[in-house]
Amino acid sequence: MIDDMDELHSKLSILGAIDVGIVVVDNDNNIQMWNEFMQNHSGLRPSEVRDKNLFRCCPGIDQVWFQRKIDRVRQLNSRVFITWQQRPYVFRFRHSRPISGQSEWMYQNVTLIPLKNPRGEVHQVGIIIYDVSEQPSHE
């Protein structure tokens, strides 16, 4: 049992420190997980956003457009990919490595994944945000 708890703690530590954004929302779009990347780029601590609506915490998100993406994940039980070519960013974060002539906002690729409960029902959606600001040809 202690080994299982140690392993869980290790996995959660990795998820917290990884250099991609990880957000988990429930079926009401309330935030259940908000990792360190998200805190560093949004200025919002996990304790400030937990159980709060994603769109209220991040008003810069195009709610109608992003809700359709989330709904597709839930309805089709399938991943959805959003590339910076489709939309330069979902979360309006300033990018931390300014490059002359580039946008002031972080370019992002985003993956939405269905998260299932033990009965196999999608009960949460995972949102993974990749900073792709340094990829060439963002013009």
Image (cartoon, rainbow, N blue to C red):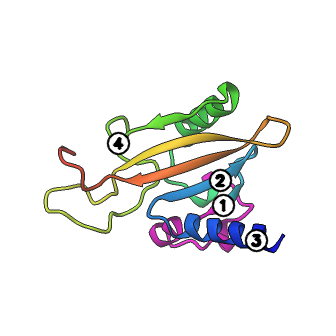
Residue at the spot of label 2: 24
Label drawn at residue 84: 4
Circle nearer the N terminus (3, 1): 3
Mark 3 surroundings within 10 Å by alpha-carbon count, few (fewer than 14), some (14 through 19), many (20 or more): few
Depth check, front residue: 30 or 126: 126
Q: Amino acid at mark 1?
A: Met
Q: Nearer the viewer, residue 15 or 38?
A: 15
Residue closest to the far left: 100
Q: Secondary structure at mark 2?
A: strand
Which secondary structure, mark 1?
Answer: strand
Q: Nearer the viewer, mark 3 or mark 1?
A: 3
Q: Quadrant of the N terminus?
A: bottom right
The Cα atoms of the two marked residues, 2 and 4, are separated by 21 Å
Q: Which residues are magenta?
A: 34-55
Upstream in sequence: badge 2 or badge 3 = 3
Residue found at x 69% / y 71%: 9
- Residue at the spot x=56%, y=57% of the render? 22
* Residue closer to the observer: 35 or 14: 14
The type of residue carrying mark 4 is Trp
Residue holding disc 3: 3
On screen, residue 75 above or below 91: above
Count of numbered labels shown in the rendering:
4
Pointer 1 residue: 33
